[in-house]
Structures are given as C-alpha cells and as structure tokens.
Image (tube, rainbow, N blue to C red):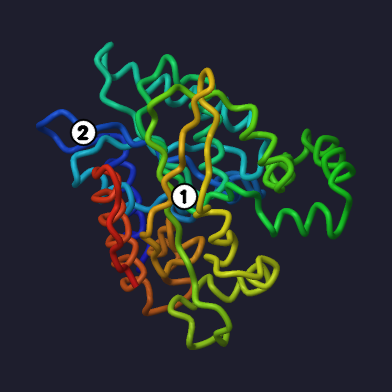
Amino acid sequence: MDILRRVLYISAFLSLILSGHLAGAAPKALVVLIPGFGSSILHEIPPHDLPPESVSPYFSATVAGTMIEAGYDVLALKGMGSAADFAVNGGRAISQINEYMLRYQGNPPPVYLLGHSMGGLLSLYVTNEIGFEVPIKKIILLSTPLRGSKVANKIANGIIPLRLAEKAAEALSGIIDLRGIVQMTTPKVDAFIAQLRLPAGIDIRAFSGVQPRNKLILPSWDAPIQSPLYIPFAKLVGEDSDGVVGLSSSLPKTMAIPSIGKNRLMVQSEPLVAELDHEEQHMDYRVIEDLFQTDEVDFIDQKQREFYQHMIRCWELPSCMPVGNK
C-alpha cells in the first residue's frame, strides 16, 4: 500500500467516525468503542509528531464500519493513556461521551459501551460514574479480564510483590502511567468490581477471541503478524486464550456485577468465540501492511468483519445461540 493509498484509507476512517452514522434513519444506538492497553502507545513514544498515516487507529475502519452499516452511531474514544489508572482513563472517556451526547440535543439514543480488554473494565467504571445520567443500556465486554489478568499477576507478583508494584507504578505515574497494569491483577479487579453499583437493568454481554495452543511460530499460525509475539504471554496464561486473556477470565461461567440496592447484574458469557488473537480483534492491519509484507491482511479483515457481524446479531437478541466463526 503506497503512502497516498494509506492516507486516503485513514482519511476515510476518520470521515466515517466523524460522521457517526449513515444518513437517514435515527441510529439504533450509540456504540462507544473503548480501547484497552496500548490504546495510544504510538502517540506516547517520541517523537510525538508522528504523521497520521503512521499511526493505526485502535479500532479499525472495519470494526466501526460494520456497526455503522448495521444502523448504529459510533464514537471511537481516543487520547486514552496506554496503561493509565482507571480513574484517569475513565475521566477522559466520560468527557468525550458527554461532549458527543450534546449532538443529540436532549434526545439521545440508547448507549452501548463496547470495551476491548482493559477497556471493558473502563466501561464498567464509566457506567458506575454516569450510568444514571446517560442512557447506557448495554455493556459489551470483549476479551476483558473479568477475573483478572494472569499476565498482570505474573508481572506484579512474580517479579515484584503486588504492594511494591503498586507503589512503583504510583511513583512513576508522572513520567509514564503504569497503574492500569497493576489494576488488572486479580485482587485489584475483584476489589474494583465489588465496589461498583451500576444502574439496574443493563444488559452485559461477554465475548472473546481465542488462538489454538501449541502451534509452531511460523508458518502454521493463521496470522503471523502478531501471534508470535503472544507466545510468551500465552505460556503465562496457561489455558485457552487469545494470547493475552484466558477464557476462564474473559468468559466466566458465572459472574455478577453489583447493582443498586441488593440487585446484581449477571454477565452473559456468549458462546461466540472467534479465532482472532488479542490484536486481531480490533487492529487495522492495512495500515502496517507494507511493514510486514503479508498476504494475511485481507483474511484477517474478513474474519474481523464476520466476528463483529455475528456479535451485533447476538447482542440484538435476548440470548445468543451458538454460532461458529472459525
């Protein structure tokens, strides 16, 4: 892909996001795409004046476009710290959501929060903070470590005790905010969820990607762009996963989120699992096509599109019937 094509592609993506939805009928809902770890890491590494064509949006045009084609308005959050404290990133998310809601002039559609990985925990944080003012009706958790991240556990407890890791992250927060990594450990996630009090009646769905285990690095991986990078993480997880988050954490058999009063919101772990690794679930590979010189880009793009099409059909139903997407 030459520079001109790349610029045109990203311009089309930005136009799609800025326009929000297809002209015509009112949107079914506003889907807010909340990024996870690494959401802005390319912007945080010097030099900060990277040209637009060198920075991939966290959520691809395929993800946003699939939702817009299905009749949804889309807001893709940006400017989030790559591993910042939940309150820091949550505050940034709330500011962008509140600003976008002004477009509806007092008559907003239902709001669906779709968070990938750590972004799913941020969606719970946001709902806890503004769920009584903003009409949040669904929370879609995509490969979110609801039982904590085994990778974060190994980093925090295997290398440095959790308490010291927390203090170190706090001390470094003025330079680089790594508190989000500590907050994804199992004790911290458990404590975070326990203190939530979400509005009653919100539909919470959990989906995930997965990669086959015990395959050679190349060429047998279905997507040789990113998967080899996840082999060390997958070993740390030690179970079926998308290379980063294990299915026992992203798709728990039973999971309840505290709601107002004595109510609890049950997380519906859906049987829709795609053979997409952690990055393939959201990343725009076309932007880095020349760098990797791979013929897998169209294949990943098609699998990504199919996954989100299935996901949309699923969340529009009271419960999702098992569908294969492998």
Query: Which residue type does callout 1 highlight?
Result: Tyr
Q: Which mark is residue 28?
A: 2
Q: Is residue 177 left or right of residue 122?
A: right
Q: At numbered mark 2, what does the secondary structure look like: helix, strand or loop?
A: loop
Q: Residue furthest front?
A: 262
Q: Position of residue 8 (x, y in %)?
A: 30, 53
Q: Which residue is mark 1?
A: 58
Residue at x 64%, y 27% (from the top left corner): 195
Q: Is residue 243 left or right of residue 26?
A: right
The nearer-to-camera label among 1 and 2 is 2
Residue at x 16%, y 28% (from the top left corner): 26
Res 196 → quadrant? top right
Residue 265, relative to residue 324: is it above or below?
above
Residue at x 45%, y 65% (from the top left corner): 288
Residue 220, relative to residue 259: is it above or below?
below
Residue at x 33%, y 42% (from the top left corner): 14
Q: At numbered mark 1, what does the secondary structure look like: helix, strand or loop?
A: loop
Residue 196, relative to residue 52: is it above or below?
above
Crowding at mark 2 (Cα within 10 Å: few <14, some 14-19, many 20+): some
Residue 106, relative to residue 291: is it above or below?
above
Q: Position of residue 165 (x, y in %)?
A: 84, 45
Task: Please state the total of marks drawn on the protein image.
Answer: 2
Crowding at mark 1 (Cα within 10 Å: few <14, some 14-19, many 20+): many
